[in-house]
Amino acid sequence: MRIRIVDAFTDRPFAGNPAGVLLLDAFPDDAWLQNVAREVNHAETAFAHPLPAGGEADWALRWFTPATEVDMCGHATLATAHVLHTTGAATGTVRFAARCGILTATAHEDGTTTLDFPTSSLTPVEAPAGIAEALGAGIVSVHDTSDHIGDLLVELADEKAVRALTPDFPALVAHSRRGIIATAAAEDPSLGYDFVSRGFFPRVGIDEDPVTGSAHTALAPFWSARLGRDELTGLQASARSGLVTTRLRGDRTLLTGSAVTVIDGELLA
């Protein structure tokens, strides 16, 4: 069967966040899906199959890290939509049925795609004991996110602090249901982004995720409240880096980005 590797939230190869994408006739057993994701060994591998016409969604969609299935993934959804649109398997807006509900992906003439995801809740919490030491930075505030994300959003003093992080990954495992999103305001918004972030997910087998679309469903309301604008651009400052444009629409967050197919091959197993 056909397997593709797509770099998401970037307009050039070897940047953004790579995801495996497999379009299937139906979902095989979970063990096979997990084995393929482990073999691909990217942050997520997406598996999708078409649904009967006339329903609330066009495709069923699931995402697996090398270690486990996850409830929601932005970059692998963008990667899947990119494959559907570039191969002619879908046009316009695609509706996905996923564990977190119905998600949509709309292709634009400029080559970008906009995802419609549920906005995460944000609950202020006390910084867990030891989290500052595990991150290696002072903490300004901590917020818990919704169940579909399961992260702690940790605000740091400035962009330099976010970029300089060298976390103790084993120590971070104890501090969230999924991972830690570290963030700060952009030092110089004239460079084209309003805030920076990095995402650490050792609990699900990903020490640092290059660009985490789902995290931006929490980053969008967090920074929109502070910056007074519903449309923002976030830079995830990993080694690969990527940009996510966010638009807050109440209980929904729109995430826009580009994607590039870098490998198109055949899975023999």
Image (cartoon, helix red, strand yellow):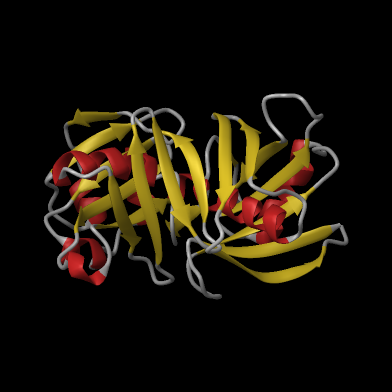
> Residue furthest toward the front?
109
Can residue 176 be seen by looking at this rendering? Answer: no
Query: In the image, what residue occupies the spot 77% across and 41% down?
Result: 49
Q: Quadrant of residue 61?
A: top right
Query: In the image, what residue occupies the spot 70% across and 71% down?
Result: 263
Query: In the image, what residue occupies the spot 70% across and 61% down?
Result: 86
Query: In the image, what residue occupies the spot 49% across and 72% down?
Result: 15
> Residue furthest toward the bottom?
13
Q: Is residue 55 above or below residue 196?
A: above
Q: Is residue 91 above or below residue 152?
A: below
Q: Quadrant of residue 242?
A: bottom left
What percent of the width, then of the height, locates residue 245? 37, 54
Q: Quadrant of residue 193?
A: bottom left
What percent of the width, then of the height, locates residue 115? 51, 45
Q: Is 228 left or right of 25, judged from the image as shown?
A: left
Q: Nearer the viewer, residue 267 or 193?
A: 193
Q: Quadrant of the C terminus?
A: bottom right
What percent of the width, then of the height, locates residue 91? 69, 49
